Image: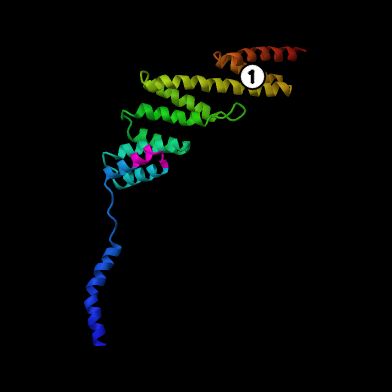
Amino acid sequence: MKIKHILIICLMPLLIASGCAWFEPKKEKTAEELANEGMAAFAKENYTAAIESFEKLKNWYPFSKFATLAELKTADAHYELEAYEEAVFAYESFENLHPRNQAVPYVVYQIGICHFKRMETIDRDQTATQKAIDVFNRLIEQFPGDVHSVRAKEHIRKCRQNLAEHEFYVGIFYYKSRHYKAAIERFETVISDYPDAGKTFQDAQQYALKCKNLLKE
């Protein structure tokens, strides 16, 4: 028994030392290491891993000079994953936190693009289309000379065309259902709001006239 006690006493320091090693926390990576890790994953198109690294950076080192980069690239990674709702949230958070950052025109543009990417076909709800127009118009108003504003104008044109075709589509539905007054309202919306809609504008004029003539019969 005495030998056992002596062995236990002798082994205690080793057990304590090894126990401390078991519970010793792993060494955390530095902010720069996490930034490099995230950027490397992003470059390899491993966006999920990139987000994990950037989230750690933001949580562990919120006041680091790399935190702003992590916020922006987190949004970009969500965008690349086509997780547009998450991307919009991340971009908007970035803009709110850093309203004077030089990346803000790009960020606002990306918010608009996220809505643009979620734009539905002309037979569906056009909420995302209108949101895209609103964001792009804000970009142009705030940063008229920025290269992203130039790109936004082309996207606005496509959005407006989509809205015009949507109104015309609904008008045709009412026309075929013989609800001519409702159809006229839709066709006249195209005529008044989307004069640049090309053939859709011309077709709306023709159908509006048809509906008016049918109401006279």
Say above or below: 114 vs 38: above
Q: Secondary structure at mark 1?
A: helix
Residue 123 is situated, as x and y percent measured from the top left of the image, at: 62, 28
- What is the magenta range? 38-47
- Quadrant in which the C terminus appears: top right
Left or right of 185? Residue 194 is left
Q: Main secondary structure of the magenta part?
A: helix
Question: Badge 1 is on which residue?
Answer: 185
Say above or below: 14 vs 176: below
Left or right of 146? Residue 8 is left
Colour scheme in the image? Answer: rainbow
Quarter where residue 46 is shown: top left
Residue 75 is situated, as x and y percent measured from the top left of the image, at: 40, 37
| Amino acid type shown at disc 1 | Glu
Left or right of 166? Residue 15 is left
Whether residue 182 is visible: no
Residue 47 is situated, as x and y percent measured from the top left of the image, at: 41, 40
> Which is nearer the eye, 180 or 48?
48
